[in-house]
Every structure is written in C-alpha cells, then in structure tokens.
Amino acid sequence: MKNLAIVFCLLMAWTQAGVAADAAAGKTMSVACSACHGADGNSMVPSFPKLAGQGDAYLIKQMRDIRDGARPVPTMAGQLDGKSDEDLANIAAYYSSQAQSGGKTKPELLELGTKVYRSGVAARNVAACSACHSPSGHGNAPAGYPSLSGQHAEYIATQLKMYRKGYEDETGRTNDGDAKIMRTIAFGLSDKEIEAVSSFISGLK
C-alpha cells in the first residue's frame, strides 16, 4: 500500500506539472524551432515532423531524449542544449495546443497501407498500428503513444526504417524502451509495407 501511495503521489505531481505548463512561454521559446517545424508546428518540409496537435507526454519524452542523447538527431544538434524540463514542458504545451494540418494518401498505396495499419502482418507477427495509435490515428496521449494522422509520409517512413535498423544496430533508433515495441514491429515490415503504411497514415483523418 505504501508503494502504491508513492506511485499515486508521483502521478499526481506529474499531472499537476503538466497542467502548470505555460503554452505562451512555450510559443516564445519555439521561435527558433519554426525554421524547420513551422510557426504553428506544421512543417512544410516532409523530412521534418509536424509537431502541432501532438500529445504533451510524447513531445516531452522525445525532446528529453534528444537533449540527453538517447535519440541522436543530427538536425537537432544543440537546439535543446540548456533547456530545462520546465522549458520542454512549455514548448510541448504550445505545440499540443495547435491544430495539425492534414495530408494525402497515394491511391496506389491505399489498400496495402490500410491492411498494415488496421490488421498488421500476421505472418510476421506485426501488430496493427491502430492498436496503440488508435483507429483514427490520434494516438493515446496519456500513454505517450504519438498521434500519427496527417504526419508527413516521408518522415514516418524514415522513422520506421530507423527503428528497423535499431533492432540490430544501435546506430538506428532505439528510444522505444526495453520492450522494443517499435523496433520489433518495424523489423517485420518490408520497404513496400513501410511506404504504404506511411502514405496511409499521412492521409488518415
């Protein structure tokens, strides 16, 4: 019971910290970010992710991982140096309050992309993306599972390939935790399946 009470208090403190985040301060701090991610978090360049509408917990984790070296991103080198956890929470609060723009699915990739997203690939034990990221693609913000719908297809495909590489090689993306959820899923996907599901996700609404 004592341990449960400690966990409950920590969760309450985390929740309160999230509520206290200052989106206005985050907007001011995000000025430098706008060069790549857009003034409102809707990047115009397919290789840079859209941040608008993303869940606070996911944004904070990714920024911490980048700042602390757990997720190397060459284009982000130095961008978060000196930022406190409070600063990151404020930036996340700003971006999460913005509306994300949509994207489009290539018609020729719709069938395969739908299958991978909604059903996975049973023959290779690849779970459906919708299980964690929701049928609508809006993710699960409290759990820290990111929103995917409307994201640039190029960015999604790049991340899936980095996770796939990270399954066997630490120079790939490895910040999905000890369970290797994303690395395991990506490892079971072919290039064509990655292209298709990324395109499907981009047009998901």
Image (tube, rainbow, N blue to C red):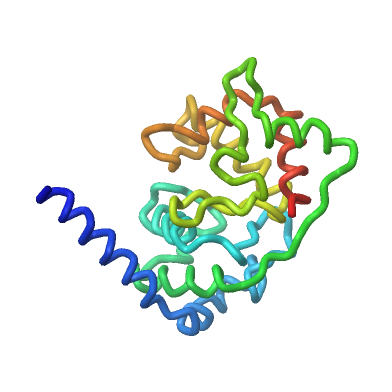
Residue at image point 61% right, 54% down: 138
Residue at image point 32% right, 71% down: 16
* Position of residue 39 measured from the top left corner of the image (x, y, whole percent): 65, 76
Relative side of 190 to 162, left or right: right
Instruction: Point out the residue furthest to the top here.
Output: 123
**Vertically, is 46 above or below 21?**
above
Could you tell me which quadrant the C terminus lies in? bottom right
Residue at image point 60% right, 23% down: 188
**Vertically, is 175 above or below 102?**
above
Q: Quadrant of residue 193?
A: top right
Instruction: Point out the residue furthest to the front here.
Output: 1
Between 118 and 47, the one lying in front of the other is 118
Q: Quadrant of residue 43?
A: bottom right
Instruction: Point out the residue furthest to the left here.
Output: 2
Relative side of 173 to 7, left or right: right
Between 121 and 59, the one lying in front of the other is 121
* Position of residue 185 measured from the top left corner of the image (x, y, whole percent): 56, 29
Residue at image point 34% right, 66% down: 15
Between 49 and 113, the one lying in front of the other is 113
**Vertically, is 115 above or below 18?**
above
* Position of residue 166 measured from the top left corner of the image (x, y, whole percent): 50, 32
Q: Quadrant of residue 106?
A: top right
Relative side of 82 to 32, left or right: left
